[in-house]
Amino acid sequence: MGKYKIVAIIGTRPEAIKMAPIISLFKKDKNIQLITISTGQHKELLKPIFKLFKIKPDIELDIMKENQSLVDIQNNVLTKTYKELSEIRPDLLLVQGDTSTVLASSLAAFYLKIPIGHVEAGLRTNDIYDPFPEEMNRLLVSGLATLHFCPTKLSKDNLGKENIKKNTFITGNTVIDSLLILSKTIKNKPSGLTKNILLTCHRRENFGKSIEEIFDTILEIAKERKDVNFIYPVHPNPNVKNLAKEKLSNVENIKLIEPLDYLDFVKAMKDSYIILTDSGGVQEEAPALGKPVLILRENTERPEAVSCGVAKIVGHNKNKIKKEIYKLLDNKEYYKSVAKGVSPYGDGKASQKIKKIVINFLDSKKQK
Ligand code: UDP
């Protein structure tokens, strides 16, 4: 039995990827009893990540049902995590990011007066409806948490502006820890004549007209540029999957594929020339791999890469997307200036820093 009991909670694919290095570190420490709870918000996407990082959730809540509303998810996670946490009574709950799992489980912990450590704290777009509902989830969790692990100075400053100044730490983002662990095991492929453009697009804010415009733009570029190969691992959400099939199937240089396991996705990022994405995690990973990233959103809570000149916001506007892709494809000097391999979101040591802070906090609490 460890000296301290910590529960780490995971609901979705990015939470698993970003929590994995923390879980691995704590598991190695005999003083800690680490209990992993999976709410299963993205059940199918979680399994391969658990396998890859050798994580076996101690408790599976299995909350996912077809076409669940946000209210259903909140209700289910709140009720079920409250029950588990009241039995386990951990010294700390660790949550990561901004999902419904994070908000509901944090609220459950708060009702039980269990302190919360929030990994990836302080990200803000300052628009409560974009991303929806994640921006509000982040805001509310910052109000509930005791320890705030901020990836960058900017995210710590964001909390400062909300008068959250106690126990805010700059640690880097743990996604870079996971990425670097895997990336070291992958050899670079020699680049061929065609250039791969890796696409991911699945966010709620893009559903409807925006995603249609994005897909129409991809189709147009694919037709105009035979030297380009689009690779698109399609998210299982039916809002995305059906439209992607309808608009982008049967085009020679657009490859629609199933979501990739994380290791294969890291390989695909390494093999790509440009990355086009609306994902948060991918915005953090691409710069660390030296890949230019175009953000398919109107706003980002991760502006650090844009400020360093390694990412650009292109939204869903056809002209903006095309202009930027063609510039990267045709202007070598410009490409080099963007693909310079700076990693504003971390150095691969975030989990170690987080662990140290957690132990200090628990030790000092015990002494009181
Ligand atoms: N990812 C993956 N396979 C894929 C697409 C993405 O493993 O086919 C990884 C990606 O490297 C990143 C994470 O999933 O670490 C991002 O998850 P997602 O885009 O679902 O969520 P977001 O980051 O937008 O919250």
Image (tube, rainbow, N blue to C red):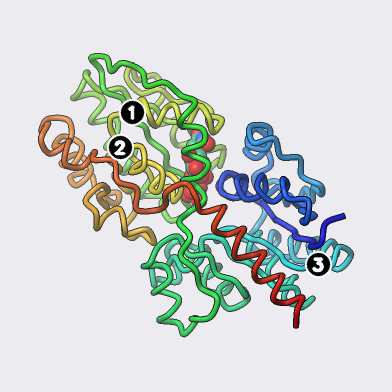
Q: Quadrant of the C terminus?
A: bottom right
Asked if residue 263 can be seen in this view, the reply is yes
Label 3 SS: helix
Q: Mark 3 points at which residue?
A: 82
Q: Look at label 3 and name its amino acid.
A: Tyr
Q: In the image, residue 132 lies at what x, y percent?
A: 49, 63
Left or right: 274 as drawn, with respect to 322: right
**Nearer-the-camera pick, 327 or 254:** 327
Label 2 SS: loop
**Which circle's residue, 3 or 2, is located before the other in the chain?**
3
- Tell me the number on the disc at residue 291: 2
**Nearer-the-camera pick, 72 or 57:** 57
Q: Look at label 1 and name its amino acid.
A: Ser
- Tell me the number on the disc at residue 272: 1
Q: In which quarter of the image is the N terminus?
A: bottom right
**Nearer-the-camera pick, 342 or 42:** 342
Asked if residue 240 can be seen in this view, the reply is no
Rendered image quadrant of residue 253: top left
Position of 154 relative to 63 (above/below): below
Mark 1 Cα shell of 10 Å, populated few (<14), some (14-19), many (≥20): many
Q: Please report the residue visible at 27 percent of the width from the left and 37 percent of the height from the top.
A: 217
Position of 339 relative to 221 (above/below): below
Q: Please report the residue visible at 55 percent of the width from the left and 40 percent of the height from the top.
A: 238
Nearest to the eye among marks 3 and 2: give it.
2
**Which circle's residue, 3 or 1, is located before the other in the chain?**
3
**Which circle's residue, 1 or 2, is located before the other in the chain?**
1
